Image: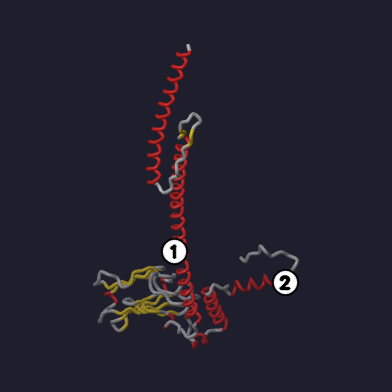
Amino acid sequence: REKKAKADRLKAEKKAKEEANRKAEEVKNAKTTSKSEASASDDASEDVIELSGDGGFDISNATGAKAASDEAQSKTKSNDTDADMKSEPEASTKATAAAVSASTSTKESNKNDDKTKKDDSDDDPKTPPPPGNGGTVPGKYIWTQTLAEVNLTIALPENTRGRDLNVVMKKTHLKVQLKSQDTAIVDAKLTKTIICDDSFWTVEDGNRLVVNLQKLHQMEWWNAVCIGDPEIDVTKVQPENSKLDELDGETRQTVEKMMFDQRQKALGLPSSEEQKKFDALEKFKQAHPEMDFSNAKMS
């Protein structure tokens, strides 16, 4: 019985030694692999191998440390990538905002410059009124006006007669054409309405056509004869002093009122009638301070 127990003990010790040698070999191989991986990675952690209670080696900590190191590196790379992806749209957005701001500033500056130039031109008292209170349409005609009528002068070939022309005057349209030509000299819509029955045309000296258009509303100035033609500044229009002096008191007052209203309208200010209503409302406010006029409107 003692011999059998001794044999079993020897057999168990032999088996334990073989198991220890096998584990040692595995640890050696694992250590060699870990060192290779550590040298290949700058951030790899050093493996730690502990001795187990049965005389073998425990490599679980080494494996866990390696896994933790790999996971940390993966998270760091992921965070860097996310940061780059976030920073790119932010940088692009900032650049776009800066470009839009610069463009807006440039447009505002140009707009202010144009407005300043226009204001200076409007406020310049030295700017003369349009010749004859009208203007010139290159290649077509020269026109003048009074409060009652508009006159057009159109150059014609020498020795032109009335029968050589086709002149059509409608309330809001004018057409002038030589019958020998396919293209009309004038064929456009008028900017204002005329009185057809009182309008007329005539050929003078065989080389020019004079068209007289009677205005329907004879208390306003035209800024152009036909739509699309160059416009004049009606705020600069002034009737001749001699003609204004020849008017009777009531007519002259009406003309001066009309001129004032047109200038006020061009400047965006109230007309004489609107100013009278405003003044009346102000007097009423002063007479009744107990009333609320915050929602009062002019009509």
Which one is nearer the viewer's eye here, 269 or 158?
Answer: 269
As displayed, is residue 30 above or below residue 230? above
Q: Secondary structure at mark 2?
A: helix
Which one is nearer the viewer's eye here, 108 or 207?
Answer: 108
Q: Position of residue 177 (x, y in %)?
A: 29, 72
Disc 2 crowd, CA 10 A, few/some/many (<14, 14-19, 20+): few
Which quarter of the image is occupied by the C terminus? bottom right
Q: Amino acid at mark 2?
A: Gln
Q: What residue is shown at x 39% (from left), y 77% (from top)?
A: 212
Mark 1 or mark 2, which is nearer the start of the sequence?
Answer: 1
Disc 1 crowd, CA 10 A, few/some/many (<14, 14-19, 20+): few
Q: Secondary structure at mark 1?
A: helix
Q: Position of residue 111 (x, y in %)?
A: 47, 71
Which quarter of the figure has residue 69?
A: top left
Q: Position of residue 156 (x, y in %)?
A: 28, 79
Q: Which mark is residue 286?
A: 2
Cβ atoms at labels 2 and 1 below 8 Å apart: no
What residue sits right under mark 1 in the picture? Answer: 99
Query: Gap between marks 2 and 1, in whole Å?
Result: 53 Å
Q: Amino acid at mark 1?
A: Ala
Which quarter of the figure has residue 284?
A: bottom right
